[in-house]
Amino acid sequence: MTEQLKFIITELNKELGTSYDLIKFDSLNEVQHLQVLVDLLANLDAGQKFDVNEEEPESISVKLLDMIRNVKYRPDVGIEISLFRKNLLTGERTTIFSILEWLLKNSNQVKKTAYLAKFLIRPDIPNDILGNADMAELLEVHDKLVEEFKESHRYTASMEHNNPSEVINDIKEMAMERDIVIKRLEVAQLNLSDVSNKETVLSTAKSMRIQQEKSKKLTSQLSEQKEKLKRASDQLQRNLGVFRGQTSAPRAPGDLIQKLNEELKVNEYLAKDKLPQELSNVRRDVELLQSVHSYGHVQRENLLQIQEKIDNVNKDIESLVQKKLALTDPHDDKLAPFRHQAAIIKRNKEAVAEKLEELKNEFRELEAQLSEKQLQVQKLLGDTVLRGEELKKYVNKLRTKSNVYKKQRSTLSSLKTEVGVLSRTLEILQTRDATLELALLNHKKLNINLDSSDIHDDIDTDDLSTKTPQELSQIIVQISGKLNEVKQDILPISNHLKPLKEEYQQLQQQHDQKKRVYDSTSINLTSQMEPLDQEVADLQKKLESKEDEWKVLRQRIEKAEQLLSVIEQENVSRNIEVSTPRQPSRLETLQMQIHQQEKQAALLKEEQKFVSERQSMLGEQSMMWNHLLELLECKIQCMDDAVDKQGSVTITKQSQTLIL
């Protein structure tokens, strides 16, 4: 804080020529601090100086806030505007010191901003006066003058930052162009010397030039009127969209009247029920706070007495409620359900009204943010942001202009090369003979016109040594005459080149500006399209899942409908006379099928149990048979081996014979 005060005092003494020190400045009261702030703003040309002690508080508020708005001061983040205004008008030290520090640190920028604010801020005019045609015309003139001032200021600022060498080169080029214009005027005077009706021709040319300028002005006015008409039609379409509820198809008058009636009912409820109730609650709270404030210092004994009174009142209320409940039977009260429904409806209305108020506040905040973003975009880009068809038309127009620019640039480069060759030739000739410039000056007096072929025959590099100085000067004059003819041929090209150069510069500036607008617009569009694409993909996934759920539910509904139709048919069949044979219902059929399936399941379970019980026994028996089979195979193998060693054995039922 001390460093801040030291900086403020030092800079104030420089700006205002005062002799403040740390003690003297710190001892000033709030009004004197406010007067110092007013003096500094007036010194920075942000407004007219005034005395805080002699002005009314409302006048001080208006003038001081206008001054701060002119210098574009913004309070720190997190400080509410209402609190900032209150602290500013009361001369609160922290707020005044922060403003003084900011103004003194950015004094050069503040002076520039205050200077521009005089010419750029639009005057505040009441809405009833804006409807006047004369006032609208004056505002349009004011806007045009503001735009002209912006262009002039921008050009002046660009000239201040230019390099001096570039300015010197521009001056040299202008001097050369001036000499060319003087020579053209001399040639034109020579050509007009033999014309008899010179004045008539000049007056006709002048009138023609005036008419051409008028036609250009009319063309520009026509284009401006078309642009304004287009903007007005777009604004009309937007307003119609808002009026019709943001829908593409127009609404019927009955729908609009119904919507207005609904809004009227909501506003009537807010004005007659909700707002008076809130106002009464606020008044009750205020009265309570005032009554609390009117009491003196509250002691503990007073609090105990108040608490005792509250307890007694609560007991009385409870006893009265019990008596009422004992006297009245809730079953006899026929209006209780209606009271309950009315209470529910009242609570729902209050909840909807609160939700509506929240949405309105949120809508106002979003509108404020949107307007702020639009102002930022307009400040950054210098023009309105193009969208949709306007952007496509602008891109096509820019492409055509770029093609024209490329063609003109190629023509300009060829002309520049030709001018460079001719200027180099002239420099070579001047270096060869110092009397060439003198011969060029006396060329009009000599009036020597020779054919180019004769000049070529007369000039021979081998015979230059034998020529006398007079003959050489004549040759130089001849060459200068040829050069003058070439220059005369180049003059219309240079005259044609000058407007092309100016047009090229204008097109280059427009191209750069529009390119910046296009780049920023494309960046904004891409940044806005990415979340939209993601949102579309998420919604597509949700839609697919919902479609699957819908198909499943549809199948269930179809099955339920089939069952319902069967049940209806069965109900119809039940109503038929008893004599007709009765068919089993769908329910009975399903119960029979369920009973059969249960029986079959019980049989299968018993069979499974029997199989599981016999499985172990059958396994053992199967293992015994396998062992017996292996034993028999072993015996057969042994018998075969014995036969091979001793002979053959014949086995019958009653005997066994061995043949050796």
Image: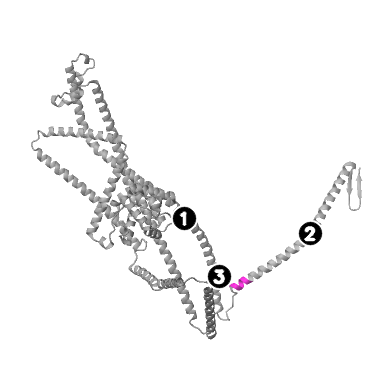
Q: Say whether residue 458 is left or right of residue 73.
A: left
Task: Give the residue at the far top of this rendering.
Answer: 466
Residues tagged 2 and 1 counted as in contact (Cβ below 8 A)? no
- Crowding near pointer 2: few (<14 within 10 Å), some, many (20+)? few
Label annotation for residue 535? 1
**Does dot 2 land on a helix, a strand or a loop?**
helix
Q: Is residue 105 visible?
A: no
In the rendered image, residue 100, in percent from the top left (x then y), is placed at: 38, 52
Label 1 or label 3, whichever comes before in sequence order: 1
Q: Amino acid at mark 2?
A: Ser
Give the numbered dot on residue 616: 2
Q: Identify the element where label 3 is drawn.
A: helix
Please provide percent x and percent y for residue 108: 34, 46
What stretch of residues is rendered in magenta? 586-591
Question: If you read the primary sequence from the N terminus, does the residue marked by circle 2 or circle 3 appear first?
Answer: 3
Q: Quadrant of residue 266?
A: bottom left
Which residue has dot 3 on it? 563
Residue 182 appears in the figure: yes
Q: Is residue 555 left or right of residue 630?
A: left
> Given this view, does label 1 or label 3 mark the residue nearer the observer?
1
- Could you give the CA–CA distance between mark 2 and mark 3, rounded to whole angstroms? 49 Å
